[in-house]
Image (tube, grey):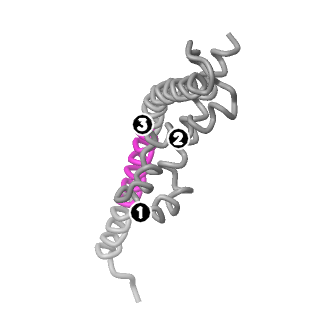
Amino acid sequence: MENLFQLFAVSAVVMGVSQTIARERIFASLRARLGGKDTWWGYLVSCPYCLSHYVAFVLVPLTGTYAIDVVVGGWPGWVLSWVLSSLLITVIAAFYRVIFWFVDESQGLVKRRQRTEEEEIATKRLVRKQVEQQVSAADEDSAPPAPH
């Protein structure tokens, strides 16, 4: 059970790191400096799925999250276990990314709806103020002349 928790935890970290580097404003200058999506390096850091492979390749040996055991021994078995475990973590991170997208998109819809309602309220206030000004101006024009 502990290994399963670590597998999902490392996958979540991979998703978070790759999403942050590939999409958030804080790394925009890095993505631009590497050429955006027009160069190989730029595309690598602009695509969360692509980047998650490399993040997983680094995090698997650092965390010891070898989720897939292979029967081949020696260094070929270690490399195969490293690559397959990294790919598994990448796939789980991709599922996390889809869930994250739905949550993020629904939050964006709520924020857009709130902004629209605030704009409508501000527009109604502005129209009401303009109407009040027109009414008060009309009242001044129709008022009987003041005696001298």
Residue 102 % position (x, y)? 43, 31
Residue found 53% across the figure and 25% down from its top = 80
Q: Amino acid at mark 3?
A: Glu
Between marks 2 and 3, how big is the CA–CA gap? 26 Å
Residue found 58% across the figure and 15% down from its top = 69
Between marks 1 and 2, how big is the CA–CA gap? 19 Å
Q: Which element carries disc 2, helix, strand or loop?
A: helix
Q: Amino acid at mark 2?
A: Tyr
Front of the two marks 1 and 2: 2
- The residues colored magenta run 108-127
For disc 3, the neighbor class at 10 Å (few under 14, some 14 to 19, many from 20) is: few
Q: Which element carries disc 1, helix, strand or loop?
A: loop
Q: Amino acid at mark 1?
A: Gly
115 part of magenta stretch: yes
Number of numbered discs visible in the structure rendering: 3
For disc 1, the neighbor class at 10 Å (few under 14, some 14 to 19, many from 20) is: some
